[in-house]
Image (tube, rainbow, N blue to C red):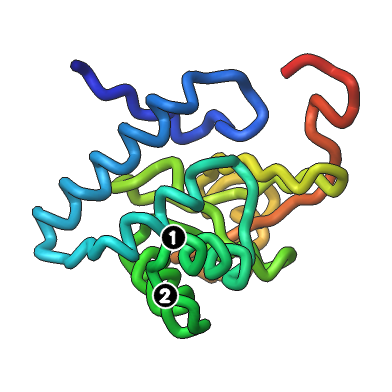
Amino acid sequence: MEQKHHDANEPVGFRRHDHTACVRDTLQRAEAICREKKLRLTPVRRRALEILLAEHRALGAYDLLAVLADEGLGNQPPVAYRALDFLVSAGFAHKIEALNAYIGCTHLGEGHNPVFLICRACKSVAETCTGPEQGRLGAAARAAGFRIERTVLEAEGLCPDCQGVPA
């Protein structure tokens, strides 16, 4: 079966897609990356990623911990924080600063600069990408002689469903 990768400039969270395939393909990519880079995707780390991918919403560490605890995978905060630290450092998850929460990465294995579109009503999050050299930020950096190496942008607003507009 051919794996479909998302277009790096296409947000995922606000459009209809085969979510079961999305989660399955992302987990398979994570497993392949771990094999390639010799990283340990333990059962807790794998399940934590699966939980983050279950919805295109950001989850707090304690939300994740509640699910892990219900499943007998640990009930102490370090369990969740260690899994999240691994997922973020491996590039499998991102921290959404505005929500103090985490979301599974929809562009695993791709070097990208994420942009997060956060719905203030339903808290769904869409991940899309932009190059750091693009737009006004890139122009301002060039004018200052500054080379941007990494950006993370978070924008808050209303998703199409909360606006009553089809995606």
- How many residues crowd mark 1 within 10 Å: few (<14), some (14–19), many (20+)? few
Residue 116 visible, this orientation? yes
In this rendered view, identify the residue nearer to me: 51 or 132: 51
User: For the residue labelled by badge 1, is the local secondary structure a helix, a strand or a loop?
Assistant: loop
Which quadrant of the figure contains the N terminus?
Answer: top left
Q: Residue under circle 2?
A: 74
The image shows residue 87, relative to residue 154, as above or below, that is below
Query: Which residue occupies 62% across, 59% down?
Result: 59
The percent coordinates of residue 159 (x first, y second) are 79, 33
Query: Which residue occupies 84% across, 48% down?
Result: 120
Residue 151 visible, this orientation? no
Q: Residue under circle 1?
A: 71
The image shows residue 5, relative to residue 95, as above or below, that is above
Q: On the rendered structure, is 115 left or right of 27? A: right
Quarter residue 21 falls in = top left
Query: Which residue occupies 18% across, 66% down?
Result: 40
Q: Amino acid at mark 2?
A: Gly
The residues bearing labels 1 and 2 have C-alpha atoms spaced at a distance of 8 Å
The percent coordinates of residue 12 (x first, y second) are 56, 32
Q: On the rendered structure, is 113 left or right of 16? A: left
Quarter residue 158 falls in = top right
Which quadrant of the figure contains the C terminus?
Answer: top right
Q: Amino acid at mark 1?
A: Glu
Q: On the rendered structure, is 97 left or right of 28? A: right
In this rendered view, identify the residue nearer to me: 136 or 55: 55
Query: Which residue occupies 37% across, 55% down?
Result: 47
